[in-house]
Image (cartoon, grey):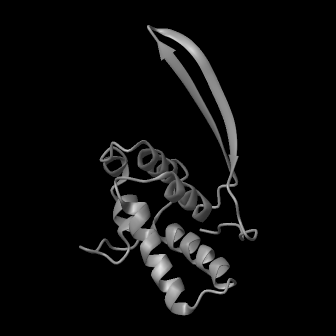
Amino acid sequence: MAEKEVGSKNPMIDVIESGLQGIHSTTNVLAFIFRKVIWDINIDAPTWYKLLNDWQIMLSKSEMTQKQLASDRGNTIRRLAKDKLQWSGFMLGLHILQIEKVDIEMVFHRNDTILTTVKVTVPIVRKSKPKPINK
């Protein structure tokens, strides 16, 4: 695993290497879920870099300049490492992790009674099919 740098250029590495402490350091539901997924599917620093590079290769096939690509990469990394993650950032993170779809189930309670359960499958939109991950 890559040696942890203080103030590293990729704050996601700090999140990944902080393990369970990093997962529980946020109160934002989407940031918690994203970090828990990273933990559960065993994403380490080298795998994160590979996924990020695969995502950037896909982006490079668009009409973005090299400067735009570099800027987008840096902004995306910072966005995903924050303790507050919005839906669009969450979905982008799942896209980078090469997740294809998410099944979401919410159970609503009142007075210890289940009122309703809502289930939905959300596809993760891609512009092209990524290569399989090889650690």
Quarter in which the N terminus is drawn:
bottom left
Residue furthest to the left in view is 6
The quadrant where residue 96 appears: bottom right
In this rendering, the answer to whether 76 lies above or below 38 is below
In this rendering, the answer to whether 120 lies above or below 54 is above
Task: Please give the name of the residue rendered at 43% of the width and 77% of the height, measured from the top-left corner.
Answer: 74
Residue 76's x, y, as percent? 47, 70
Residue furthest to the right in view is 129
In this rendering, the answer to whether 51 lies above or below 36 is below
The quadrant where residue 55 appears: bottom right
Residue 75's x, y, as percent? 43, 73
Task: Please give the name of the residue rendered at 57% of the width and 56% of the height, measured from the top-left corner.
Answer: 91
Quarter in which the C terminus is drawn:
bottom right
Q: How many marks?
A: 0
Residue 15's x, y, as percent? 36, 59
Task: Please give the name of the residue rendered at 73% of the width and 70% of the height, measured from the top-left corner.
Answer: 127
Task: Please give the name of the residue rendered at 54% of the width and 84% of the height, measured from the top-left corner.
Answer: 69
Residue furthest to the bottom in view is 66
In the image, 125: left or right of 45? right
In this rendering, the answer to whether 28 lies above or below 108 is below
Residue 25's x, y, as percent? 30, 47
